[in-house]
Amino acid sequence: MPDTPILQVENLSKFFPVQRGLFRRTVGHVKAVNDVTFTVNKGECVGLVGESGCGKTTVARCLLRLVEPDQGRILLHGEQQTFDIASASRKEMLDVRRQMQIIFQDPFSSLDPRWRVTDVIAEPLIAQKIGRAEASRRVLDILPTVGLGAHFADRFPHELSGGERQRVSIARALVVSPPLVVADEPVSALDVSVRSQIINLLLDLQSQMNLTYVFIAHDLSIVKHISHRIAVMYLGRLVEFGTTQQVFEECKHPYTKALLASVLIPDPTHREQSYVLEGEVPSPLNPPSGCHFSTRCPFAQEQCSAEEPDLRDMGNGHLVRCHFAEDLDLSEGVFALPLATPSASA
Amino acid sequence: MPDSQPILEVLDLHVHFKMLAGVVRAVDGVNFTVERGRCLGIVGESGCGKSVTARSILRLLHSSQTSGQILYHPDGDDEPIDLVNLDPRGDAIRAIRGKDIAMIFQEPMTSLTPVYTIGEQIMESIRQHQDLSEEESQELAISMLNKVGIPDAERRFADYPHQMSGGMRQRVMIAIALCCEPRVLIADEPTTALDVTIQAQILRLIRSLQQDLDMSVIMITHDLSVIAQLADFVVVMYLGQMAEKAPVVELFQNPKHPYTQALLRSIVRPDTPPREQLHSISGSVPDPRNAPSGCRFRNRCPSVHDRCLEDPPVVEFGPQHTATCWLYVDE
Ligand SMILES: Nc1ncnc2c1ncn2[C@@H]1O[C@H](COP(=O)(O)OP(=O)(O)OP(=O)(O)O)[C@@H](O)[C@H]1O
Ligand SMILES: Nc1ncnc2c1ncn2[C@@H]1O[C@H](COP(=O)(O)OP(=O)(O)OP(=O)(O)O)[C@@H](O)[C@H]1O
Ligand code: SF4
Ligand code: SF4
Ligand SMILES: [Mg+2]
Ligand SMILES: [Mg+2]
């Protein structure tokens, strides 16, 4: 696929003020997203991963201007025009929303309990000032696309299973036919047997409708399955970005390596891969100085806590934020720590 | 093997809830044995009855109708105790709860009390079962916090739950569960709410404590990877029924029940070809109040047959491997 950027995120930052006391005095800032840069090409899926609180949802919300970014540009190359979402006017944002929609993390909370399925799906159309009759017609058109029968149109959210609810939120995002879809943990709340249905649906729709995805998830196996390129975040920082091959097979950041190594392998005869990263994610209010990962990194040197590393290109667009990215040996041995083998019962 | 002695036997367990809208047969005919020093995994999707099974062992369900047997074999040659016969509010079960059989609950935040420090909460649990002085129980509490990997335990002792991260709170729950050195630890989704790196820490902790203390573990999860990494023996549940039961390697390599087979096929593995369609199970888990008669999996099963309208038989496939399914019975 030719690499035509559809979305360029440049130096994006979002700091939330932390307020305390009777007069809500600002005592500091959570650097939820800190100088994040990445590109999304037409027709690809970019995965965004990292532990809870690293800023994935905040990135997604900035992309849709559901929160105001503090710094940076978010360039959306639309069909006729390029927008900078970070500074777009209200009127421009209407156009932006026709080209980019979001599927939320929690389908339960993103659906109003008093709305019927048809109202939920039609809402983005109404926001685009499309008439009721036309909106209803388009809702009925989109339902089979996400595998729901027409009889679902009159149901309430509580009458749907988790998988059906998630199909409704996908329909709602796709009803304005946006070329770009941001999906924030679209399968995390689903049962195993339903999760694969939704992943298949997302893959199908992508090829049918030539969609571009930004796909956020904490399940690395799923991100690996669906993504062409992957961005890894830690404490608001982008620490590694590259193709799925580069990030999974040739990763150069110790944090990425640790994340990959803590994925549990669904095979009882392979219990040795598990690596346990020590310590916890530090508070984003007060991140460690220098490299934010220095407090947990097995390779940390003096320089690491003194100086923050830059995001550097290691070749072929493989970006890594580590002082020693060239020199580190992240081969299995360093990280391998065996879990005990299964005992044979009886 | 001489060392495979049962510590807990669950025999034909049924737990039903009478609701206005009908009877929820949350657990319907579950059988398994927990062996000393071993880990039994219970796996299944949301609502299949994992937590109800766990809670019924400790008699924590007051409004339910429970039948069957739950035999606890204490150390030594004492007669087994049938926990089903114990009064849920009586002294007998209280003496066992927390002391012999301890549990880590699904939501650590709701099971810790917000108004007491974590130190006070651990000491309270020690006080219930052990006759120790104030200093001794404080010492024990701090050593437990150390053991579960809480750095700076002496200082964290005075922290309130909200001052800790999710991973730390889960460690505190484990410390409380382990302070009386239980024979059986029931862990109900102990890592579901946690990040992958913290999940790996907690699972390793449970595994090593299991070995150090020669404890038995019942690990409850919806995640087959957790089962693969921790369990010695597995029970697969679907809508309150036991679909399959087998030693872990046998289950992963030679699954017999169509539900187990489909579950195993639908998980993404390191070698799953990228971006190809995944195997999936059609439909979704029905509301337990409208569970199908006969085999409860029949409206989603690719091998469904007329016979499946009747309750399927339990078929044996070798030592300790059974599946509840009509497929393997000649017509
Ligand atoms: N509206 C807000 N006000 C203040 N702080 C916020 C707000 N939204 C997010 N944060 C903080 O910003 C950080 C990043 O949060 P975010 O929700 O983006 O993380 P995430 O990567 O999506 O995590 P998760 O995996 O748990 O969904 C967190 O520390 C969070 O507490
Ligand atoms: N106290 C109760 N009264 C009535 N029904 C109940 C009660 N507790 C549980 N149930 C029902 O019993 C069934 C089994 O619930 P259980 O909590 O054991 O599921 P689970 O397998 O632990 O699911 P999850 O993975 O979501 O935790 C569910 O349908 C649930 O709604
Ligand atoms: S900069 Fe230092 S602390 Fe940070 S990841 Fe690299 S080696 Fe580790
Ligand atoms: S009993 Fe019938 S419906 Fe149930 S799992 Fe077996 S073949 Fe499928
Ligand atoms: Mg999020
Ligand atoms: Mg449960």
Image (tube, grey):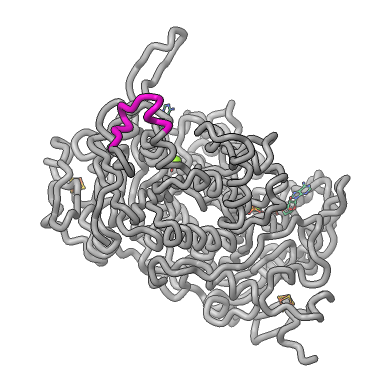
> Would you say residue A84 sits in the magenta stretch?
yes
The answer to whether residue B120 is left or right of residue B143 is right
Q: Position of residue B163 (x, y in %)?
A: 46, 30
Q: Which residue reaches farthest top?
A: A23
Q: Position of residue B262 (x, y in %)?
A: 59, 72
Relative to A64, residue B242 above or below: below
Question: Which residue is located at x 39 percent, y 72 percent?
Answer: B273
Magenta residues span A82-94
Answer yes or no: is residue A23 visible.
yes
Say which quarter of the image contains residue B133: top right
Question: Which residue is located at x 40 percent, y 63 percent?
Answer: A225
The answer to whether residue B236 is left or right of residue B83 is left
Asked whether A238 or B149 is in front, the reply is A238
Relative to A156, residue B103 above or below: below
Asked whether B171 or A164 is in front, the reply is A164
Majority secondary structure of magenta residues: helix
Asked whether A118 or A159 is in front, the reply is A118
Q: Position of residue B247 (x, y in %)?
A: 58, 76
